[in-house]
Each structure stands twice: as C-alpha cells, then as structure tokens.
C-alpha cells in the first residue's frame, strides 16, 4: 500500500471527492482513504474524471474527480491497495 494522493474537496450532494494525485491511478484499481491514521473506506475506482471528462487513468499532478461510496473529508490521504 502506498500513498498516491490527497483529498482536496468533498461534494456531499453528489458523493464525489477531488483528489490531487502524487502517483498514477487507473480505473479498476483498489484505493483506501485514511485520515489521521484511521481507515475511512476502501473501494475500487469505477471512474475517473478530469475537467468533467471520463478517463481510464490519471497521473502525478492531475486533479481528478472520484465517485465515493462513503463520506470522505478534505485532507484524507489516498492509498493504492496492492
């Protein structure tokens, strides 16, 4: 498990987080959200959006939108699960 980004915003009405990536992420990969050392949620990436466009993958420096299954507060770290 290694860190690939950080949540910069959470839109509760649509259940989407904005993540600033430090690494690569692709649809189908498993991620985990951690905040303050506490696991918040784990899920599979169903879709990635950049500027409202669907993508199969994104890389370091990209700001992406991800649909989430549970509330994830700003500042949560995002880890890729192997």
Image: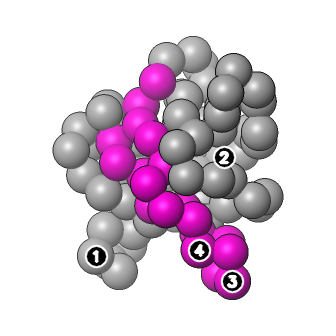
Please tell me the numbered disc located at residue 44: 2
Residue 9 in picture, x, y percent from top left: 49, 62
Could you tell me how far apart the alpha carbons at marks 2 and 1 are, in whole angstroms? 21 Å
- Whether residue 56 appears in this view of the structure is no
Residue in view at x 53 percent, y 34 percent: 77
Q: CA distance from mark 3 to mark 2?
A: 20 Å
- What mark, if any, has residue 37 been given in the picture? none
Q: Is residue 29 left or right of residue 26?
A: right
Question: Which image quarter: residue 68?
Answer: bottom right
Q: Report the predominant secondary structure element of the magenta stretch.
A: strand
Q: Mark 1: few, some, or many residues within 10 Å (few <14, many ≥20)?
A: few
Residue furthest toward the left? 61
> Which element type, helix, strand or loop, lies under badge 1?
loop
* Earlier-in-chain disc, 1 versus 4: 4
Q: Residue at x 71, y 45 (%)?
A: 43
Q: Residues within 10 Å of mark 3 (few under 14, many from 20)?
A: few
Q: Is residue 56 magenta?
A: no
Which of discs 4 and 2 lies nearer the camera? The answer is 4
The residue under label 3 is 13
Stretch in magenta: 3-21
Report if the CB atoms under discs 3 and 4 are less than 8 Å apart: yes
């Amino acid at each position: 498990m290694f860190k690939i980004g950080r949540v910069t915003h959470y839109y509760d009405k649509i259940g989407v987080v904005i993540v600033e990536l430090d690494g690569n992420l692709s649809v189908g990969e498993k991620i985990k959200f951690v905040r303050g050392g506490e696991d918040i949620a784990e899920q599979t990436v169903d879709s990635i959006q950049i500027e409202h466009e669907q993508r199969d993958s994104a890389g370091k420096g990209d700001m992406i939108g991800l649909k989430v299954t549970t509330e994830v507060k700003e500042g949560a770290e995002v880890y890729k699960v192997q």
